Amino acid sequence: MSRQHREPVIFVVSNRLPVTVTRTDDNTYDVSSSSGGLVGALQGFAGSTEFRWYGWPGLEIPEQHRAMVEEKLATQKAYPIFFNKALEDKHYNGFSNKILWPLLHYQADQIHISKEDWTAYQEVNRAFAESIGSEAEDGDIIWIQDYHLLLMPQYLRQVFGDGKRIRIGFFLHTVFPSSDFFRILPVRKDLLESLLHCDLVGFHNQDYTHHFLDCCTKFLHLDTSGSQVIFQDRKVNLLTSPVGIDPSEFRKLLDRSDVKQRVQGLKEKYKGVQLIISVDRLDYIKGIPLRIEAMDAFLTKYPNYADKVVLLQVVIPSREDVKDYRGLHNQINQAVSRVNEKHGPVDMMPIHSLFSSVSKAELAALYAVSDVCIVSSIRDGFNMVSLEYVVCQREHHGVLLLSEFAGASEVLDESVSINPWDTDEFADAIQCALTMGREEKTARWESLNKRVEQFTSKRWGEAFLELLKNSDHGHTARHGV
Ligand code: F6P
C-alpha cells in the first residue's frame, strides 16, 4: 500500500508480544495476556495511541497454523513474527539471556559467551527487520523495545537504503552498564553501532545514558555533546525517561467487589501481624537471597518480632530453560526453610514463599494489605513493583523499602533506601519501616503517589513518540554541535 493511501503507521516491536500463544490439546491455539514490565508499560499508552505491535508469539507455530494464529492476534492489534524453536531458543535463552542479560546487570559469572548464539541473535534481528521493513512506508515510525533487538536498527536501515524516510527509536528497559563492564562483550562495537542507526535512543535513568555515551566515546571514538552522539554525520539523540505504570488500572481493581472481599479475607488471615510483601520474577538480579539474609538478621536482632511479622514473598517463575535460573529456585527454598526453622514458632513461620504467577487482581489485594514492601534488587533497569505498591496503598500509606540499585530509586526519593548487601542496615531499615509513625508514612506516601500519578506509562510513551516524530532524521550535523 503506498503512502497516499494511508496515514503514517507506528510500529512497536518487542520480542514478547502483549499476548502469549499456547497450543491446546486439540491442536488449536489459546491466547493469554503476557506479563512483565515492558508489556505493562506499552499497554499503558495503547489506549491513547494507535500502534501495531510486532513480536514473537511465544512458541513455534507450524506453517499450516500460522494464518489462524495471525487472525487471532490481529484482533488484539498484535502481529506475530514466526521462528523455529531451535533458532528462537538460541536468540532468547542463549544470546539474550545467557550473555546480554547478565552483562547488562553486571553479573560476570553468569555470562556464557557462544558464537552460535551470536549468529542466531543476528539471524532473528535480521528477520524482524526484514519483516517490518517490508511493511513500513515513507513517513512511518518504528519503535524497537529492549535488549533482544539491539541489532534491528542497523538491519532496518539496510533494508530501507536511502529510499525511505523512516524514523527509528529504541528504548532499553534494562540497566546499561559502565564502559568498564560493557567492554567484556566481544561484539560490543556491533551493538553500539547498530543503536546509532536510530534517531532516538531512550534509557530509564541518567547513569545508563551516561554509560552509553561513554561507551560511544571509548569504543567507537565518536564525538558526543550533551545528550547527542554524532555518527556518520548524523545526530543521534539520547533521552533519559523513566517508565511509569497505569495507576488507574490498579485503582479500578481495588474498587472491584471480589478484590475488596479478598482484601478483607487477607486482613483477617493476617490479623495481629505486620505484613511485608515482595514480588519478583525468579531472577538473580532481584536480590532474593540477600532479602532472606536480611530477614534473618532482623529477627536475630529484634527477636520479639518472631510471631508478629510475616514476609510474604511472591516469586514468579521466569526463563526456566536457562540453567542459572533453575539453581536459584533451590537456593531460595533452602534459605527460606533455614530462616523459618531458626525463628518461627511452628504455627507461625516468618517467611511465606509462593512460587507461582499471580493475577493482577490478587497482586493488588496483596499490595493493599501489606504494611511494607521490599524491593531488594542487586541491579534492576527500573522496577515496576515499587510503583504498583505505592498506588495500592491509598488507605494505609505503607512504607516502600527500595534498593539503591533499582533504576526507580532515582525518582522515588521518599522511599526508604537500602543497600541489599549491607545486611545490618537492611535489618534496621525493616525495623524502621515497621515502627514508622503515621505522619511520616503519610508524608512519604503522598509524595511518592504524586509522582506515580503524574509520570504514567501513557505520558512516558507519548513523550518518547513525540520526540521521535520531531527528530531530525537524515539531517547532516556539523561535528562538535
Ligand atoms: O527488564 C526487562 C524485561 O524485558 C522486562 O520488561 C520484563 O518484565 C522482563 O525483562 C522479563 O522478560 P521476559 O519474561 O520476556 O524474559
Image: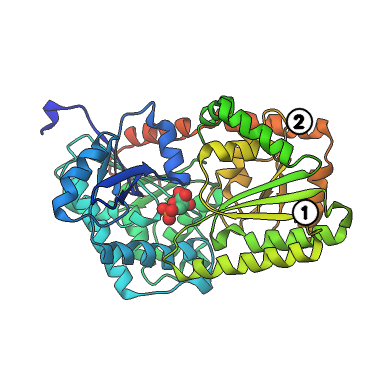
Q: In which quarter of the image is the C terminus?
A: top left
Residue drawn at x 54%, y 70% is 327
Q: Can residue 421 be seen in this view?
A: no
Q: In which quarter of the image is residue 368?
A: top right
- Residue 161 position in % (x across, y down): 16, 49
Q: Residue 443 carries which label?
A: 2
**Disc count in the image?**
2
Q: Relative to 84, say whether 418 is above or below.
A: above
Residue drawn at x 83%, y 40% is 436
**Residue, disc 1:** 348
Q: Crowding near pointer 2: few (<14 within 10 Å), some, many (20+)?
A: few
Compute the Cα span from label 1 to label 2.
33 Å
Tell me: 41 left or right of 349.
Answer: left
Q: Is mark 2 on a helix, strand or loop?
A: helix
- Residue 28 position in % (x across, y down): 24, 47
The answer to which of marks 1 and 2 sits earlier in the sequence is 1
- Name the amino acid, label 1: Met
Q: Which mark is residue 35?
A: none
Q: Nearer the viewer, mark 1 or mark 2?
A: 1
- Residue 60 position in % (x across, y down): 25, 57
Q: Quadrant of residue 428?
A: bottom right
Q: Which coloring applies here?
A: rainbow
Query: Answer yes or no: do the residues labelled 1 and 2 have beta carbons within 8 Å?
Result: no
Q: Relative to 254, say whether 11 is above or below.
A: below
Tell me: 179 left or right of 336.
Answer: left
Q: Which of 481 and 294 is in front in this view?
A: 294
Q: Which of 32 and 140 is in front in this view?
A: 32
Q: Is mark 1 on a helix, strand or loop?
A: loop
Residue drawn at x 23%, y 51% is 27
- Residue 120 position in % (x across, y down): 27, 66
